[in-house]
Image (spheres, helix red, strand yellow):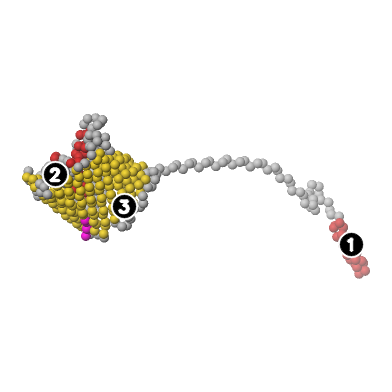
Amino acid sequence: MRNSMASVLAFVVGLTPLVAFGQAETPVAAPAGAPDQTTPAPAPAAPPASAAPAEPPAPAAPATPVAPPPIAFTWEALVDAYYMYNFTGNPSTQGPAAPRQFDVAANSFSLNYAKLGVGADTQYVAFRMDLGAGHTAAIINANSGGLSGTGPVPAGLTASQYANDFLVQQAFATVKPTTWLTFDAGRFVTTASAEVIESNKNWLYSRSMLYYGVPLLHTGLRVNVTASPSLKLQASLVNGWNNDPDNNIGKTFGANATYAPPDLGLNVSVTTYIGKEALASGGDTRILLDGVVTKDIAQASVGLNVDYLKNGSQYWVGAAAMGKYAFTDLFNVAGRFELLSSKAGGYGPLGVPAAPAAFGTPPVTSYAGDAVLYEGTLMGGLTVAKHFELRLELRGDFANQDLFDKGGVARKNQFTGLLAFLAYF
């Protein structure tokens, strides 16, 4: 029995390698339709790729509109009123005689000047307009009306334009081709004198005798050149002095040089106006030379104004020294002394008083001969909030002839006291 079992085991052991060898050499056939397990099937061909549709071009960005150049607007306003007492007047409403320019009404509260100025400035173009009303406007108009011809304009234009108390002080346009060259066309204030029409921009309230003898306004063309940060030059071609339209065929040439170094508080200005302004053709050439020097020294400011005018055989020359001291932002004092010599009746705006009789100002008794005039003025100013001022001023005018008047009696001096009220922005 044991031998039989051993024989069976031996047969099974011997048969096992043969079976294993047979499975390795002869694989069993795969069922029909089944993939071949020994050789990887090739990857199915990818379908042809269709062309991707082209994206439409992005819409062009809208053009950025060109922004207009920025406009810088400026404005200023002034209300100027005063009360004057003429100690030489008889009656008390008698105004002081020339050479007083705008302070001409005595024993009366007077609206001297109310002004509004506007301006607009762009990179290449600018304009400026100053409009005013009051006694100052009427005085300038009266002077301008007498110097402005009717010419081809309709009759009555001169009267309607100047016989009132509304004034176009300035109205001009500016073209700026470069940063250093500009052109002005229209009406503009003169560059002569240390003083201007607006009282709040002057150190003292009343104007000097020199201011009484120089032009106020011009109508025409100007060329302005900024030669350096310190030096500015100007040339002008204008009708003449204070006239529009012109009353003669002549034109006046003007030139100005201003030297004002930054941060030095120094200003030096030289102006000239030259032209034949006779009503008839030909005539004498009028020449004005005006020099102004001002200097700031700490809380003080000092200035000197010198003028020379020649018109044929007539001429006058004068000098005014002035100063101002600010004790605080609230209180300041100012003073002026000037001396003027007139030959052959040459002093005065074209030899006639500037102030009209309507304001009670009698004319100077005589311009016919030689005369020496001088005056002294003291003023105290109280400033409120940098936009309102009270100015108390005392003034004496003197001459070597009887050029002033008291109740019809000629005399060599006159004295006035004045309180001014100024509001400005």
Q: Which residues are magenta?
A: 323-327
Left or right side of 15 for 225: left
Left or right side of 27 for 158: left
SS at circle 1: helix
Nearer the observer: mark 3 or 1; the answer is 3
Residue 68 in picture, x, y percent from top left: 40, 43
The amino acid type, in three-letter code, at marker 2 is: Gly
User: In the displayed image of the protein, which residue is found farthest to the bottom?
Assistant: 2
Looking at the image, tell me whether mark 1 or mark 2 is earlier in sequence order.
1
Instruction: State the residue position of label 1.
Output: 15
Compared to residue 216, the image places residue 325 above or below, namely below
Instruction: Kindly check if marks 3 and 1 are in contact, taking CB atoms under 8 A apart as contact.
Output: no
Q: Which mark is residue 259?
A: 3
Instruction: State the residue position of label 2.
Output: 369
The amino acid type, in three-letter code, at marker 1 is: Leu
Residue 326 in picture, x, y percent from top left: 22, 58
Q: Main structural element of the magenta stretch: helix, strand or loop?
A: strand
For label 2, the crowd category at 10 Å Cα-Cα, with few meaning under 14, some 14 to 19 and many 20 or more, is few
